[in-house]
Image (tube, rainbow, N blue to C red):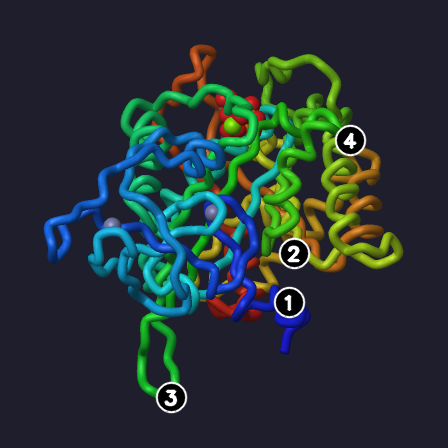
Amino acid sequence: MTPLDLLRPTRGDRLVCPYCYTRFTERLILFRCGGRPGPDGRRCAPVEDTAIRLHLGRRERLPPVFAADGRRARALCPDCGVSTGAQVCVTCHARLPVNFGRIPGRLIALVGAREAGKTVFMTVLIHELMHRVGARFQASVGGSDDHTRHRFHTDYESPLYDDARLLGATRRTGVAREPLVFRFTSRRRGPLGRRPRHTLLSFFDTAGEDLTTEASVETNLRYLDNADGIILLLDPLRMRGAHAEAAPGTPPPRDRSDHPPLDMLSRVTDLLLRRTGSPSRLIPVPMAVCLTKLDVFHDALDPGSPLRRPQPDSPYFDESDSRDVHAQIRRLLHRWDGGRIDAHITNHYAEARYFGVSALGHAPDAEQRLQGGVRPYRVADPFLWMLGGFGVVPSREGRS
Ligand SMILES: Nc1nc2c(ncn2[C@@H]2O[C@H](COP(=O)(O)OP(=O)(O)OP(=O)(O)O)[C@@H](O)[C@H]2O)c(=O)[nH]1
Ligand SMILES: [Mg+2]
Ligand SMILES: [Zn+2]
Ligand SMILES: [Zn+2]
């Protein structure tokens, strides 16, 4: 058993919805009527679903939801008598993935201050998972529902990859912002041969502006509180000592207001400390602390730096390479930020690892267009570290 095994949320009867991150037991799962005419011609008409509007911000007219034994795969609609297998969340009424109670789900929250690079990182990470990383681990990754598939393609992937255009700031929308939910399917050798193994992944991209005051951090509490892993993105350009080492011509961050990364990190920590209940214990949730936009510092790193190596491409998570990167990032944190972030992480988190990534590979031009396409570097590392800890991908000492 690895330390991460001990930290796994107790599953079984305690499920967490990948769309709204509330907890419930399997028995409470609701069903949605299929809306087709029943044996005696009765048919349930679509109605506006207020739970979907309230929790996910979607306006939709759908056949009604009803309660039945959620441990069963199907139930009979009490109004029209038609059998349905469409299971939905107790709270937000989102359609749950097939076999939801039986697929391990991993909820990964992405946090970072404004302009830290969260939306770009998430878009490129998912794109990489669907292509290069999928091939590397013989895994397939796809949206778990039509809504995620459509939204990821039109709102995230296509602007960046087809139009080479950077997305605007993620706007804060009160309660309603919906995570993107993907299914990671790999084949693992087991006693019964190679069997497909599914893991649900839910990505929640916070708006940086949600993390600037204590009050608005609260709105993200549920997501942080129920996440199985947190990817914290820090923009090194916000660190006092870093700008001098950035590539010539790097514009200072557009938003000049002063929100040093440490303030944001402290607010996240305060929330997570409430979850552990005891302020004297280290926070157990795996925390990947990730410096973004590293392309800007490429020339400032010495030639032997692990951050100038080609990114790992072996079919396992390379532990020794990751520890080298961790040590290098720790040195950079001391050089750029005086070690305050490092001290904070060490004093509060039981499972933290440092990463350095560049989602774009090079800086966009003044009009926020990306000449020369997306050339990511190490974007999948933090994520694979977590999947390694969860036992979803193999993790091993590499050659380096
Ligand atoms: N050089 C470089 N710049 C990047 C990279 N990733 C993001 N950026 C820049 O950072 C800006 C902000 O990125 P976003 O992903 O929108 O940041 P965000 O954290 O989602 O911001 P909010 O939604 O406002 O909280 C982009 O418009 C780019 O100019 C990268 O890998 N390299
Ligand atoms: Mg954003
Ligand atoms: Zn839900
Ligand atoms: Zn019905």
Residue name at image x 22 percent, y 58 percent: 81
Q: Do the residues labelled 1 and 4 touch (CB within 8 Å)?
A: no
Tag 2 residue: 286
Disc 2/disc 3 C-alpha distance (Å):
30 Å
Give the residue type at disc 3: Pro
Other-residue count near label 1 (Cα within 10 Å), few / some / many at <14 / 14–19 / ≥20: some
> Between disc 3 and disc 4, whose residue precedes?
3
| Label 2 beta carbon less than 8 Å to ligand 1 | no
Q: Is mark 2 on a helix, strand or loop?
A: loop
Q: Where is residue 296 in the image (x, y as percent from the top left)?
A: 57, 28
Q: What element carries label 4?
A: helix
Figure quadrant of the C terminus: bottom right
> Between disc 2 and disc 3, whose residue precedes?
3
Disc 1/disc 3 C-alpha distance (Å):
24 Å
Q: Where is residue 111 in the image (x, y as percent from the top left)?
A: 61, 38
Other-residue count near label 2 (Cα within 10 Å), few / some / many at <14 / 14–19 / ≥20: many
> Between disc 2 and disc 4, whose residue precedes?
4
Disc 2/disc 1 C-alpha distance (Å):
8 Å
Tag 3 residue: 191
Q: Is residue 98 visible?
A: yes
Q: Do the residues labelled 2 and 1 touch (CB within 8 Å)?
A: yes
Q: Position of residue 254 (x, y in %)?
A: 60, 13
Residue name at image x 40 percent, y 44 percent: 126
| Label 4 beta carbon less than 8 Å to ligand 1 | no
63 lies left or right of 260: left
Tag 1 residue: 4
Disc 3/disc 4 C-alpha distance (Å):
49 Å
Give the residue type at disc 2: Pro
Tag 4 residue: 263
160 lies left or right of 277: left
